[in-house]
Image (cartoon, grey):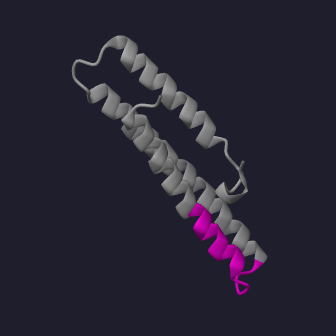
């Protein structure tokens, strides 16, 4: 079972990812954008998406660190969960509609 905090972090990651995929769809659907510009826009979106995901993870780690009285075992488990989520979301290259 996942903690509510991890569920919130994962929900934020999914929301950010969906937003970026919608932007990609808009770019790809606009025939007035040249292939070169489209490629540049996609590269920019990829960089911004990774940055946004990194920020969410940093904020989640800071929240764990700022939680007073959190037992060491719980803190370690929270960090392991975040590391797993980070690996899952940072390596994803398939649009959400095409996964699973």
| Location of residue 17 by image quarter | bottom right
Provide residue 72's location: percent of width, then percent of height: 35, 12
Asked if residue 80 is positioned above or below residue 45 in the image, the reply reads: above
Principal secondary structure, stretch drawn in magenta: helix
Task: Write down the quadrant of residue 61 in the picture.
Answer: top left
84 vs 64, left or right, is right
Residue depicted at 37% across the width and 36% down the height: 5
- Choose top left, top right, bottom left or bottom right for residue 7: top left
Task: Residue lying at the far left in this picture: please name it.
Answer: 68
Residue appearing at x 49%, y 31% in the figure: 82
Query: Left or right: 37 with respect to 17?
Result: right
- Up the image or down, 39 lies above or below 79; here it is below
Query: What residue is drawn where x is 46% and y is 31%?
Result: 2
Considering depth in this image, is 77 or 47 the residue closer to the camera?
77
Give the farthest residue toward the front.
1
Residue range (magenta): 20-34
Along the viewing direction, whichever of 74 and 40 lies nearer the viewer? 74
Horizontal side, residue 46 vs residue 60: left or right = right
Q: Is residue 32 magenta?
A: yes
Residue 13 lies, in percent from the top left, at 50, 48
In this rendering, the answer to whether 18 lies above or below 4 is below
In this view, 55 is above or below 37: above
Locate residue 68, reporting x and y percent. Answer: 22, 23
Q: Is residue 44 magenta?
A: no
């Amino acid at each position: 079972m996942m903690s509510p905090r991890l569920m919130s972090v994962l929900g934020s990651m999914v929301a950010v990812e969906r937003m970026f995929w919608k932007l990609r769809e808009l770019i790809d659907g606009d025939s007035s954008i040249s292939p070169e510009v489209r490629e540049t826009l996609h590269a920019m979106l990829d960089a911004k998406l990774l940055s946004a995901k990194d920020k969410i993870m940093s904020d989640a780690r800071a929240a764990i660190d700022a939680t007073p009285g959190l037992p060491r075992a719980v803190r370690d488990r929270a960090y392991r969960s975040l590391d797993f989520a980070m690996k899952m979301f940072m390596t994803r290259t398939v649009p959400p509609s095409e996964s699973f």
